[in-house]
Image: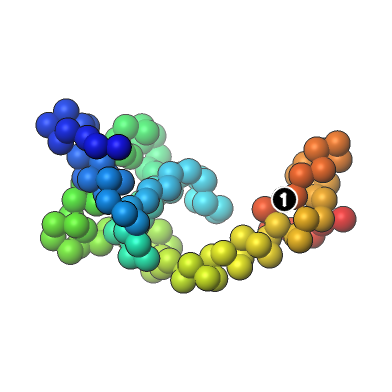
Amino acid sequence: MSHTPQTDPWPHIAELLDKPGGHISIGRMPPIDGAAIAIRDQTLLASLVRREGESFPDLLNRLDNAVGKAVHEGRVTNEINGGRFQLSPSSIRKKALADSAHSGRTCTKYHPAAARAPCVRDHTVT
């Protein structure tokens, strides 16, 4: 996944993703409708909240700038939870994901009964 910095619209994100442990997540993180998070290994580089009316390319531009500041200047941008957002240790994240899958029980609240899919939402299941 090699990128040419001169032609890549988001060179800092591309550089992050080309390195081991580089990861971004963009999407809904309840209760936040639009979050953009960048990490390297277990280190938070940036957490952004999508602004009212902000286009997706504009959010990516802000994420790219924030990643560049973190990597090259050591300045972390943290907009989630009033700047108090922290990554949980990976063992806690893995346990939370396993626990939220309800040990394979079927969820009928968010999934039709016919789907019979394990659910990763945090709620009571039948």
Q: Label 1: which residue?
A: 119
Q: Position of residue 41 (x, y in %)?
A: 35, 62
Observer able to see residue 84: yes
Q: Amino acid at mark 1?
A: Cys
Q: Quadrant of the C terminus?
A: bottom right
* Residue under the point 61% across and 65% down: 96
Residue closer to the observer: 82 or 119: 119
Helix or strand or loop: what does disc 1 sit on? loop
| Quarter-of-image position of residue 20 | bottom left
Q: Residues within 10 Å of mark 1 (few under 14, many from 20)?
A: many
- Furthest toward the top, the residue is 7
| Quarter-of-image position of residue 114 | top right
Observer able to see residue 79: no
- Residue 99 relative to residue 36: left or right: right
* Residue under the point 52% across and 46% down: 28
Q: Position of residue 77 (x, y in %)?
A: 27, 58
Q: Quadrant of the N terminus?
A: top left
Total number of numbered labels?
1
| For residue 26, above or below residue 89 | above
- Residue 48 relative to residue 65: left or right: right
* Residue under the point 37% across and 33% down: 56
